[in-house]
Amino acid sequence: DTAVSQTPKYLVTQMGNDKSIKCEQNLGHDTMYWYKQDSKKFLKIMFSYNNKELIINETVPNRFSPKSPDKAHLNLHINSLELGDSAVYFCASSQRFGESPLHFGNGTRLTVT
Amino acid sequence: RKEVEQDPGPFNVPEGATVAFNCTYSNSASQSFFWYRQDCRKEPKLLMSVYSSGNEDGRFTAQLNRASQYISLLIRDSKLSDSATYLCVVNGSGGGADGLTFGKGTHLIIQP
């Protein structure tokens, strides 16, 4: 069974579109995250979601919005996609906020054309 | 100064050799330290935690130097399968949304 699963694996779309990436974890973890890994391979935290508390990295544009229907799901919605949004987006979870190990999904490779 | 800093490499190392790399962190209040491994086009996975007294897991040894604010990873008898990017991760480095802060990674290539 996949612990953290995200869909789709690949997403190719045009500038200006709105898209969503879904993430689910079956580990019973309290905290979920979204990370962005750009072309230089730098992993940057975008959001942390813990017990209905959302912690946002202030550098993330408000075109990005996380949605958590329940503890096991944290989806990422992106409005008005831009070329610079092209990256690999990883969902992750941990038992508690800020703890290791982080369990990552296998990533969503987003290409904006 | 960046919060978590690593030499990006690549480090090209012959199979069987010993290789070591460091990671420095800026926040002296950081409490927990880890090494993650990321294979090409894959997700990062925990390799090992780094304890104050140093710890070993097979061919891998991790050490922490609080005074100089760096952690190290040593790989002995390197295998081709060790080729990957090694990410240094620090807890309590950035606060706020960060929780765990990742370095940019050190790219290791083991050559036959």
Image: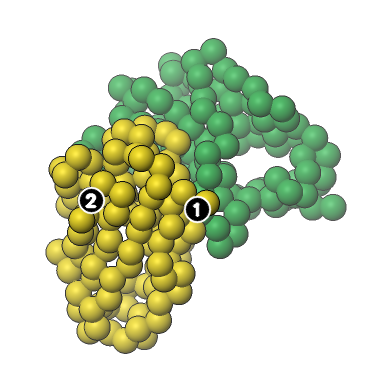
Chain colours: A yellow, B green
Query: Residue B36's spot in the image, x, y percent?
Result: 52, 41
Displayed quadrant of residue B98 = top left
Query: Residue B87's spot in the image, x, y percent?
Result: 51, 43
Q: Is residue B18 left or right of residue A64?
A: right
Q: Give the residue drawn at x 84%, y 52%.
A: B112
Mark 1 element type: loop
Mark 2 element type: strand
Foreground pick, B111 / A1:
A1
Q: Give the residue drawn at x 27%, y 63%.
A: A76
Q: Chain of mark 2?
A: A
Callout 1: 10 Å neighbours few (<14), some, many (20+)?
A: few
Identify the residue under disc 1: A2
Displayed quadrant of residue B54 = top right
Give me the disc on residue A14.
none
Q: Is residue A91 left or right of residue A41?
A: left
Q: Is residue A42 left or right of residue B38?
A: left
Foreground pick, B103 / B1:
B103
Q: Give the residue drawn at x 56%, y 62%.
A: B41
Q: Chain of mark 1?
A: A
Using the numbered discs, state the Cα–Cα distance from disc 2 to disc 1 in whole angstroms: 18 Å
Q: Give the residue drawn at x 48%, y 38%.
A: B88
The amino acid type of the residue labelled 2 equals: Asp
Foreground pick, A54 / B102:
A54
The amino acid type of the residue labelled 1 equals: Thr
Identify the residue under disc 2: A70
Callout 2: 10 Å neighbours few (<14), some, many (20+)?
A: few
Foreground pick, A77 / A112:
A77
Query: Residue B8's spot in the image, x, y percent?
Result: 54, 49
